[in-house]
Image (cartoon, grey):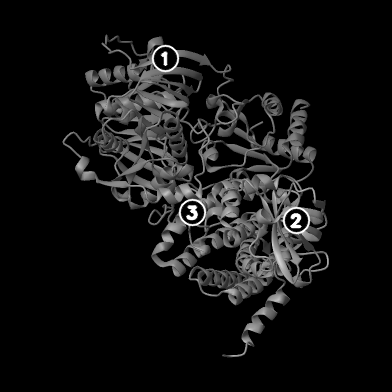
Amino acid sequence: MLGVEAVAIELDEVSPGLRSSGKVLLVKGEKVLEDDGDLAATSIVEVAKAKGLQALLVGDTRFGRVVAAKAAARLRVGSLGKGKRLRAEGGSLVVTRDVYGGKFLADVAARLPCVALVQPGSYSAAEGSAVPAETMTLTVGDPKIVVKETKRGRQAEAGIKSATIIVSAGRGFAKKDDLLLASDLAKALGGALGGSRPLSSDLGWLGEEQQIGLTGAYVHPKLYVAVGISGQLQHVAGIKDSKVIVAINNDKEAPIFQFADYGIVGDLYEVLPALTKLLKNG
Amino acid sequence: MKLFGPEHERVLSSLYGDGASEFDVLLRSFSAVLEAKVLPLSLGLDQGKGDIGQTRRTLFEQGLCKLSHPERYGGMGLPFGVYALAMELAGAADASTAMSIGIHNTVADAVAQFGSEEQRRKLLPSLLSGEKLAAFALTEPSSGSDARSMRTRAAKDGKHFVLDGSKMFITNAGEADVYLVFASTGAGHSAFLVEGSNPGLKVGAQLREKLGMRGSHTAEVKLEKCRVAAEDSLLGDEGAGFECAKKLLDSSRIVMGMMCVGIARTAYVKALAYSRSRELFGKKLSDFQLTREKLANSVIEMNASRLLCMHAARLKELGLSFTSEAAQGKVLATETSARTCDAAIQLLGGYGYATDDVHRHWRDARLLAIGEGASEVLRLLIASRELEPTA
Amino acid sequence: MNIVVLVKDAVDEAELRADPSGHPIQKGATTKMSNFDKNGVEEAVKQKEEHGGTITVLTLGGAESKKAMREAMAMGGTRGVHILAEPEAAPDSLGTAYYLAKAIQRIGEVDLVVCSEGASDTYMGQVGAMVAEFLGMPFLAYAKKVEVDGVKITCEQGVEKGVRVLEAKLPAVVSVLSETNVPRYPTLLQVMVASKKAIEDVQLSTLKESDYPVTGFEVLSVTVQPVNRKRLILEGKPEEAAKKLVEALRQEGVL
């Protein structure tokens, strides 16, 4: 696909479908994910040097970004962030990505070898034969950061990154308990529940992994229902690849209606139960 | 809505030259705060929801009242025009809050200009910070424009004065910690600082039928055997009260005029946006000449009002007389602003008439052709200057 | 405590327009302090208020960038260091991190470097970690909460799956999130005072040494993303609209 010796780096299992015709470098181990990205970066750098790898592709998650940055700095190569699509061109790796809040699409390039962060879900899983695993022994220094504690968040719902139907909640919901209306609709549709950044970051009503948008996940469902979401550029950036977008908001001026196929201007507290009822009754 | 726009930048440049960039940065920062913390609450205040104390506090914390007061009293020592322009922006964010603070600041002005060193020391810091709120009590049930005919009396009693009478349409009534009360004393009039806690000062019921400025608290204030100590309370010389009032009103008229320009601008921006999107007869509302005429007239009048008021402000900064120019600025600003707000209602059509968020601007602006010097009185003032015997 | 806070003067994406061929009109585009950087500045100011010391606002950018620096200084920055780099010749993430690190090394005894999760206009989220690498400092990323106790820094890190509590020794680099704090609005007096604070200009060439990393980074094209959506509004009471929606979705084949 890329035409160069690429390596997809798997950190944690959050980058599904990221495969190339080349080798997959699996950086696994409890220890690796327990530090600040130092160990993972070290491993990647060692393998890259040993194997003369050209492109190091890392899944774009918070942890992935840190690891990619450290690896790039150590190898003194370019690092391209959050790409939707990649291609090799004339000795460089070209990444297509959202810029300026998602208003514009940019093609940015760095000379090979380089590191690139790939938006999880950008590519569907390809067929390929299993490659025999190789083991390498590495020496790593003492970590500069100690992880004192890991508090798991709520159990993540069916991953939104691979969901085919998503119901997404925004600030239109008055309180956390009201999200039940959204999750009921999601259930009736057979889909997953996601949300805009304020609901996970500022309010803590949803987990980080449910955040959809420029700084969260990019989703690719066949149906995306945005409920009580105003439609800021930063959120919309994450839903562009949806086949059908529906917006429900009581403000007819809300920007989301410009980005939707179907819109209902109304009170979500009335529309959602009506919708859920209809779907349940077939 | 961006409150600080290119037109403000240009006014600052043309009036202050090189010094403008500093004021630019200040007013931009101020606008950002207004947009985030005052503007979103404005409609609610008109509709009787929300608390003007909150929006007022935002402006006090920013230091709005400190802008042009001298540094030695805790002010920032900036030119009066910067404060005037800041008040346009405050008016654009919320008329009631701007009005409330403008009136409060007139009392701070009074203490700064006419107070004894002791009165300034005791009162100014807390007035400038907003820790204490003030009200300006000149108007009475039976005397507005004819202030000299006021009936409130202050009778001397040894080292005290006893005030009796009634004041009407007092902004900040009931909330204020200190009231500047004008009363007739002997042959003339005097100004008195009366604490809100004084048992002789009674605040009547809030006026609930005001056309606009619904966010601010307005009521009648009765003085019943209201006893005050002369040394603390008398502001300026006995008998000089009326002259003090006139001087204070000169400055406050500039501010009220600028505030009106702000109110008009908010209405105008809504009308402009609507005219761009509304479709009729196969065209946009903004395509029609009669629409464009309204927009052009609004811009001409807002800019003219702003510049005339700022001209008066600059004269004040330079220590020159500015009474007539301030009156001219207020007449122009208050009358044309109401016209601009009315044009906005017209452009927004049914929605203009049926939506608080549109017609409240006209309702707010409409007061200012009446208060702080009715247009009629101001025109007489301007004309009498013209007809003064030439030396 | 000597703190350095990294601030970027980013393109204001809300104001950025496209020309007829779909390219962004970058010349004269409005800029603003990158949204997330405000949280970085706020965190730096909080730490200074608690532990005393100074804050150096460090920015790499064109002449326009001083505006954002003054904002940061009004919030509580003590002084500024401006690495002058014209937007047309702006370095990539690695180059930017290189210059920032060199400038920090010149500043001297730095205890803490604060930055944000990423720039609001490009959002690559790489510079913070790279700066830490060049400085040989630990990088505490995505900190929801930061606590400094002597030479120990502890933070609560927000990751997708939950929260991790990290600990390291100063000097360190920490990046904060938008939920970490609520950035303060400076008062008019603070803005006025900030306009008089010192900003040191540094030429890019004085920082560049033989170890400058050349990555061959290039922006090949930037084009506006068109929106091709139906934008159909389904009218009626909730029940009616819901019915219309279900029908439409069945027609679309997504239900």
Q: x, y (%) of residue B208? A: 82, 54
Identify the amino acid type marked 2.
Thr
Q: Residues within 10 Å of mark 3 (few under 14, many from 20)?
A: few
Q: State the quadrant of the N terminus of chain B.
A: bottom right
Up-down relation of residue A281 to residue B374 (above or below): above
Q: Nearer the viewer, residue A211 or B200?
A: B200
Up-down relation of residue C146 to residue B109 (above or below): above
In which quadrant of the rendered view does residue A259 lie? top right
Q: x, y (%) of residue C168? A: 37, 18
Q: x, y (%) of residue C234? A: 72, 44
- Marked residue chain, label 1: A
Up-down relation of residue C36 to residue B391 (above or below): above
Q: Residues within 10 Å of mark 1 (few under 14, many from 20)?
A: many
Q: Can residue B100 be seen in this snapshot? A: no
Q: Nearer the viewer, residue C237 or B328?
A: B328
Q: Are marks 1 and 2 in contact (CB under 8 Å)?
A: no
Identify the amino acid type marked 3.
Arg
Q: x, y (%) of residue A4? A: 29, 28
Left or right side of B230 for A70: left
Q: Can residue C93 be seen in this snapshot? A: yes
Residue to which mark 3 is pinned:
B72
- Marked residue chain, label 2: B
Same chain shared by disc 1 and disc 3: no
The CA distance from mark 1 to mark 3 is 54 Å
Looking at the image, which residue sits at the far bottom? B390
Q: State the quadrant of the C terminus of chain B.
A: bottom right
Left or right side of B357 for B108: left
Q: Which mark is residue B355?
A: 2
The CA distance from mark 1 to mark 2 is 57 Å
Left or right side of A159 for B157: right
Q: Nearer the viewer, residue B173 or A224?
A: B173
Residue to which mark 1 is pinned:
A147
